[in-house]
Image (tube, rainbow, N blue to C red):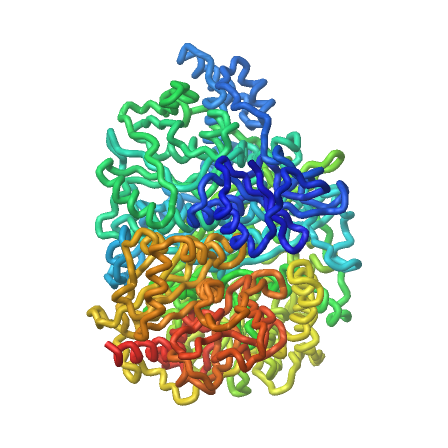
Amino acid sequence: MIQFFKTSGETVIAVDAILPLSQNDIEKLTWLFSGAGFLKQEKLEGWFVGPRKEMLTPWSTNAVEITQNMGIKGIVRIEEFVGVENENAAFDPMLQAIYNNLDQHIFIIDKQPDPILEIDDIAAYNEQEGLALSAEEIDYLNSVSKAMGRPLTDSEVYGFAQVNSEHCRHKIFNGTFVIDGKEMESSLFQMIKKTSKENLNKIVSAYKDNCSFVQGPVAQQFAPKTQDNPDFFEIKEVETVLSLKAETHNFPTTVEPFNGASTGTGGEIRDRIGGGKASFPVAGTAVYMTSYPRTEAQRPWEQSTEERDWLYQTPEEILIKASNGASDFGNKFGQPLIAGSVLTFEHFESFKKYGYDKVIMLAGGIGYGNKKDSLKDDPGKGDSVVLLGGDNYRIGMGGGAVSSVATGEFKNHIELNAVQRANPEMQKRVYNAIRALGESDNNPIISIHDHGAGGHLNCLSELVETTGGKIDTAKLPVGDPTLSQKEIIGNESQERMGLVMKPENVELLKRISDRERAPMYEIGETTGDMQFTFENSKTGEKPIDWQLGYMFGNPPKTVLEDTTENPDFENLQYNPEEINSLVENVIQLESVACKDWLTNKVDRSVTGRIAKQQGAGKLHLPLNNVGVITLDYQGKAGIATSIGHAPVAGLVDAPSGSILSIAEALTNIIWAPLTDKIRSISLSANWMWPAKNPGENARIYHAVEAASDFACALGINIPTGKDSMSMTQKYKDDVVYAPGTVIISASGEVSDVRKTVEPVLVNDESKEILFIDFSFTERALGGSAFAQSINQIGKTAPNVTNPEKFVAAFNTVQTLIEEELILAGHDIGSGGLITSLLELCFSSNKGGMKVNLDGFNEADAVKILFSENPGIIIQCADNEKVKEQLIENEVGFILLGNSVPYRKVRISHSENETDFDIDSLRDLWFKTSYLLDRNQSGKELALERFKNYKKHELDYDFRAFSGVAADFGINMDRREKSGIKAAIIREKGVNGDREMAYAMHLAGMDVKDVHMTDLIAGRETLEDINMIVFVGGFSNSDVLGSAKGWAGAFKYNEKARIALENFYKREDTLSLGVCNGCQLMVELDLVYPEHSIKPRMEHNESHKFESAFLNVDILENQSVMLGNMEGMKLGIWVAHGEGKFYLPFNEMEYHIPMKYSHDEYPANPNGSHFSTAAICSRDGRHLAMMPHLERAFMPWQWANYPIDRKKDEIAPWVQAFVNARDWIFERL
């Protein structure tokens, strides 16, 4: 029966239970729904918008699990419905439906599972289901059917289509190209592989796994000793491999951007999890490319093409929703997003429309693994096949195949079937279980793969590819009883991983999975007979039963014939006298302008291992060229990553586009000191192309060839990548072609993360500013942001004509960085030299620059300022030493000028002088971000952010803090036990546990890992623990309110409740709650139990996640942890969605030890009463705070650390943990 609960607003919560709910159950639900009233009606009149009945939402999955953890039995679905005026209310048809009345039938799907079909006419079935099979593949399947002596089943035909789709098998990249009548010698894939054959460098694994690996350094692994029970953290040395992966999710993001981008991010993370025999993702990247968002009318570059009747969503909606989706997945999984890019583009010329109507959404990432587990083993006969993750739903049916064709080509219902469903919290649970095995001394995983396109079909067939296997479909978890056998094994429900292990090791995984609340199923075994069978043990049905060789097939190789047809664009026309307005237009393009609208909503600090993310300088503006992580908390060795692309230049000349994309990635990553300089670098190349259109096959061939040749000449490799060959959007009477695009993701081992250079000019007039050319050819404007801003493309694009000189320049700059001879630096990228000069001045409110361009020997100042020829700008720490090394290594440079005290960039050229006002141009640059931010933060707060971003400059007061570890009794290499016992308390979905545990360990505590399941089961009682910390993250995905479900697990489970009550009764204990942990302490009333009205944690006033590095002031206070830090003004990370302290009494009734340094948004990121950042109990023992001190205890973790304190070993926040250590020690 469905029971209804009404909230204080217009929301109705519908609870579907298969068992009667008792009065006690209803009271629990009323508490869980924050006082929502129980309605006794079986039917509610009116109009409502809610989720489609066919799609059980991730919100429901989490809500149901919360009720189970609270001891309520029989609930199968919980959904939210919002009352609306009538049937004309706005809703998202991809995810929602409109309901006339809510009754007992709102979740009923009148459908029986379809029977297994025998397919007599494969060609007709292919067309009916949109499987994208070629004529040759249909002939092949007919021959298989004949050889087997029976018709193939629908599952077999469908499975073959998914496993052999362009998306999965890359038929174009493996195909034979015939261009202008001549057969090419190499396939595209062979040319990519050539880079690794010629430049193996440190490759460990390439082209044969879910991600690539290169050799890494020895690092410290910090993890619990055992992970099937509560246990203490320990440190051990491990030899590492470094992972790199990037892939696109273009079609799903075009159709439904939030879940499309979210599952794209999740899928890429799973690829890294599934590398080798398990590896560990650390940080992500994202790239978004759409047609023009038209956020403000009459912007000249948006006028060249008419706005279309968009098939699914407008470009502006896609930019907002897709970035929301990618950000949300990373935020909830616990992967920071530390680098990325945006490009918007449309153009109409020579009767052809270009644009990203079919969007590009690229998700990439870096991480590491244990070298001993970097290669998969081959399963033997009789090994167990295990599934980790959630239930099967009718999701993504046909995603792999439908992604392989142009959008708009099939009927909408087929494309709707490919809509995804994201549940990052489930993926975190699955990852935790796999991580536990990967961190063990004897990892029992033999092989592991993720579930992506093709679902079980792809994943499980890859797992048993060398042996064969038998899978019991009755053991596969089914969340929708109407699924057919084909849908059960072929759906693309996310957040699932398949593993093979010896039967005797399954029980260990079962214990770990139960502890992590990660659903686990032993679903089959390897057979050794190369047969691949799905059989239902209860019904005897066999939807698939054939040789693996038939499934992977050997259909004829794709042959692609084409002729060379390069677009012929007109010469650029512009007026050099309009230089100021030209600059103003260029810096407002989405590709050039401020990306704060992206970075302010995505976690960039989680893991506590982020040494460099987008935000730079005292204004924390998103300007950094490179993202950098550390491999451990020692904070020296790490990994750098960067992005490069040049698709508009590629329209002018496809080979140049590839070379420029690689060059941009390299001139971005150059700012991190790489262990082996340029040879440290490996690339991922992701190709998005409107293939099979006239001239485009020839263009991609030459583009790949150029990338291969350039990488080989540079001495680097491309060990991973992906392709999406259907970048065309079809309308009823029109076609829009995406520019052929390659996105390069670069990564490399960093020798010392603390030496990474930022694009923040130092105000010292004696320090010279130099330009270093990486192009070695004439300035060219074709394909530039400048050309785009005047609605043109141009005839000639930049290039790199001398790879040897490029290497010499790169390696020399690396040496300068290693020797700390560069104060600031920036690449020449989108927007050209003028943009780079201005951006060097943007992240500060002081100083400017005086620049002379005569050294370029170019008469046209527009070409100098706006061309995007690869190059960099550096500010010297020692002028003579820098120039000495450049000259010694035969690296050319131009002396541009120096910094000045006034707020202008003053440029002189051929006796002409022009001033560019930094502050007014910075506002224009930021304005584009503001226009997009209005649709996510709301108009008022977006405007407030726009007005205040330059006012909230970071400032610090460290008081007497020395920065020397020994002064605080800290041994940075401690291994022995101290006897001071602390515990982190975590629930499913939290993600801030490791950095918190290390901060306490560093301070001198022995730290125990305790899961809520340990407390509920009685495995842990906290009797010997002196300090507990409730850590940050998204417990239960914040469903039904932040920490509400976590609180319910304490409140309604006796052993957990008693353990907590007993802990708080003791007088020798401390507690800390950070972020989600703070929300839990407030929800459980652990800070002010004496108050008649308790505080609340509410949604941020922006109603979105807020991520920032900002100032807090530590006030006079009695907190054990913060008491002796009074007067300090420090930098700290915030990353939360519900961080507003609602404090109903007068400020004097609360003990507020820490406040945000400004009352205004965004420096007060959530609108907290009294600008509160933390609250403390009356006796000072219990502290709840929203900012993340555990992500700022080392100087390199700060987004901006005082430049005069470079030698600090530790940051001031360590003091808080040391204070806790000392307080406990005194009472032992």
**Is residue 105 left or right of 524 when viewed as pictured?**
right
In the rendered image, the vertical position of residue 432 relative to residue 980, given as above or below:
above
* Residue furthest front as drawn: 23
Q: Position of residue 44 (x, y in %)?
A: 68, 41
Work out whether residue 590 or residue 71 is closer to the camera in this orientation and state it.
71
* Residue furthest top as drawn: 149
* Residue furthest bottom as drawn: 960
Q: Position of residue 1035 (x, y in %)?
A: 45, 56
- The image quadrant where one finds the C terminus is bottom left
- The image quadrant where one finds the N terminus is top right
In the rendered image, the vertical position of residue 273 relative to residue 128, given as above or below:
below
Name which quarter of the figure residue 816 lies in. bottom left
How many numbered discs, if any? 0
Work out whether residue 1084 or residue 802 is closer to the camera in this orientation and state it.
1084
- Tell me the residue at 50%/76% (across/down): 824
**Is residue 630 left or right of 860 when viewed as pictured?**
left
Work out whether residue 1181 or residue 188 is closer to the camera in this orientation and state it.
1181
* Residue furthest left as drawn: 976
Q: Position of residue 806 (x, y in %)?
A: 46, 62
Work out whether residue 986 or residue 100 is closer to the camera in this orientation and state it.
100
In the rendered image, the vertical position of residue 423 relative to residue 1135, given as above or below:
above
- Tell me the residue at 41%/22% (across/down): 544
Q: Position of residue 1065 (x, y in %)?
A: 34, 70
- Tell me the residue at 49%/69% (across/down): 1186
Would you say residue 248 is visible in this rendering?
no
Would you say residue 1162 is visible in this rendering?
yes
